[in-house]
Amino acid sequence: MSAGHPELVAAIASEVIASGPIPFARFMELALYHPQFGYYMRSSKPAAERIGRKGDFYTSSDVHPILGQALAKQAEQMDRLLGQPSPFTIVEMGPGKGLLARHILSTARRDYPSLFNHLRYVLIERSPAMREAQRTNLAPWLDRPERMTWVDGLAQIPPHSLTGLCLSNELVDSFPIHRIQMTARGLEELWVDYRDGRFVECLKPLSSDRLASHLRRIPSDWPEGYRTEINLQALDWMTQVAQRLNRGFVLTIDYGHTAQDLYSVDRTRGTFLCYRQHKVHEDPFLDLGEQDMTSHVDFSSLATAGEEQGLQTTGYTNQMSFLMGLGIEQMLAGLAQDSPELTAAIQLLKPNGMGTTFKVLVQHKAVPSPKLDGLRFKPFFRSVLATQSAA
Ligand SMILES: C[S@@+](CC[C@H](N)C(=O)[O-])C[C@H]1O[C@@H](n2cnc3c(N)ncnc32)[C@H](O)[C@@H]1O
């Protein structure tokens, strides 16, 4: 293990030396998204060295196309509920290598021609290096910009202009987070200092009033030493998404929990993790720029942020139930017994793995009481997303 990419280490160190300790969220922002040297941004690091079997972690779309197939089916039902608008737009944010888009588009073309005929697919990707990988994986779709296109960010989309589906898979867990610790002095934040040629963490007061006010809205009766994370960027993102939607749905897939569960007293170490070559650890100062960093998503706060911007919460379930509601059993029946494809597809359903770790939050705007197949089974969740007490 090393300190990481030398130019990234130097860039972060010089910011700390110039300004003093920085909040962990700023450190993570630079580690992942420094414009030249950040983990996701470096053009010299091929996308397959980040995501996939030869990379640091893999996502559902690397395992099997079945999630994309199920999402195409869900999009077709959403399209009908919206009265088949022209176009029905899917905006996928943080598309990684573009595999999910490829699976959704090819399933729509094969199985749902009525959707496919008026489907427009928009990708929003922060990293130029990942956009390159998307162009490669989506090469067959590039010749029709009215069918598929990229925009630089949500800000480029006019408010209330979208009719369709705003989609993301494993985007929100990659946003920089504030790390919080309960101390004898009350709640403090982890900041990052640079001493004797190394990054070290230190505890200091909360870096903003906004963070303090958010912490007052979540259950925080924690013992001394308790650590957790707050993802303020997730709330800004949800606000922006909600404002862009005219009519339709927001579907967010990620690993996460309700606030009640994420911030329960027994989750004493939080959920922050680093991934390198499929190995998991908790040290953000190793292999800077060479490892991914993530934390689990607070779906209650995401749902509330959407509600504050006019979205209604359609439902919240786990990936296994979502896929079962969309008829994954029939889809799997088409795969040969004991085949590697079947084994791979089943991974996405596993009750002790991806099937329950991953959650699905669906929100809607200007669609009267939609009943979605993907939300048919909501096994063990009470309707508890709104666990927040008023500020
Ligand atoms: C963990 S990867 C998820 C990949 C993909 N969705 C999948 O399922 O394989 C996160 C992706 O989100 C991108 N990303 C991070 N922040 C973003 C933002 N604010 N807007 C758009 N893309 C972003 C990253 O560059 C990366 O490609």
Image (spheres, rainbow, N blue to C red):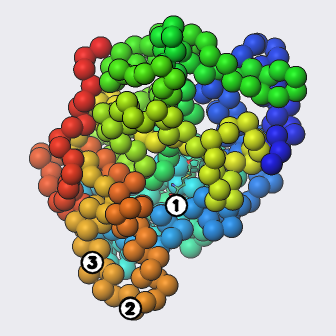
Residue 23 in sight in this render: no
Q: Measured along the vertical axis of the image, is residue 145 above or below residue 388?
A: below
Asked if the residue at label 1 sits under 8 Å from ligand 1, the reply is yes
Label 2 belongs to which residue? 337
Give the residue number, with chain letter if any, for mark 3: 329
Disc on the earlier residue, 2 or 1:
1
Q: Amino acid at mark 3?
A: Glu
Determine whether the residue tagged by mark 1 lies in a helix, strand or loop: loop
Return the residue found at the far left: 369
Give me the residue at 82% from left, 34% from top.
9
Q: Which residue is mark 1?
A: 59
Q: Amino acid at mark 1?
A: Thr
* Above or below 131: residue 340: below
The mark nearer the N terminus, 3 or 2, is: 3
Does residue 352 lie above or below 211 as drawn?
below
Q: What's the residue type where badge 2 is placed? A: Gln
The answer to whether mark 2 and mark 1 are in CB contact below 8 A is: no
